Amino acid sequence: MSFSQYSASIPLLTRSLQNLKAIIEKAQVFAETKKVKPEVIAASRLAVDMLPLSAQIQIACDNAKGCGARLAGVDNPSYEDNEKTLEELKLRIERTLEFLGKLKPEQFEGSEDKAIVLSFPNVTLNFSGQDYISQFVLPNFYFHVTTAYAILRHIGVELGKGDYLGRVGG
């Protein structure tokens, strides 16, 4: 049995988003305990020239839902990128998880060779469906999830590798 496009993407994205949601919940407890406004945490960043936590989570969600939509051949839900609090960011993750949960493996059949074109202001990227997952979606997604984790850890939220990985092994 071959490793399907669905198996190579949706379960991995879903798992990390579930872990990210749990991390955000820890950040909410941290904010309440330390009496820090949730919007201050959402605006936190590692360096002045980096995107804030809110953008890291928005981009991670966009990568996940974009992957599912493009490979399954369905409409990509549009989110406004207006989240300013931890609760709003958690809700964005939940909406993304809900969308991914509706996708079925059979919708991904034959998407290995599907042409995926991403247009950005300064560059257009062309991929096969398989290369889209391995060269763009997963590296980009994990970069933003890791950066969100690092921002929260940097400001003092008590997190460890187990929070990032979630429950591992059967």
Image: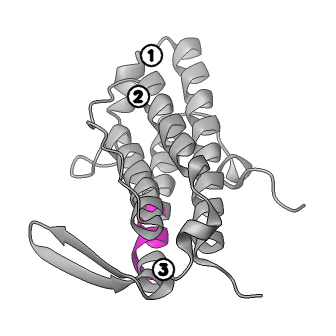
At a point 81% along the width and 58% down the height, the residue shown is 168
Q: Residue furthest left?
A: 122
Q: Which mark is residue 41?
A: 2
Which residue in the structure is indicated by mark 3? 111
**Mark 3 crowdedness (10 Å alpha carbons): few <14, some 14-19, many ≥20:** some
Q: Position of residue 150 (x, y in %)?
A: 49, 49
Q: Position of residue 166 (x, y in %)?
A: 73, 50
- Using the image as rendered, state which of residue 138 and residue 69 is in the foreground: 69
At a point 39% along the width and 59% down the height, the residue shown is 66
Mark 3 is on which residue type? Ser
Mark 2 is on which residue type? Ile
Placement of the N terminus among the 4 image quadrants:
bottom right
- Using the image as rendered, state which of residue 79 and residue 35 is in the foreground: 79
- Give the mark, 3 or 1, whose residue is nearer the N terminus: 1
Q: Is residue 97 left or right of residue 77?
A: right
Q: How many marks?
A: 3
At a point 49% along the width and 36% down the height, the residue shown is 95
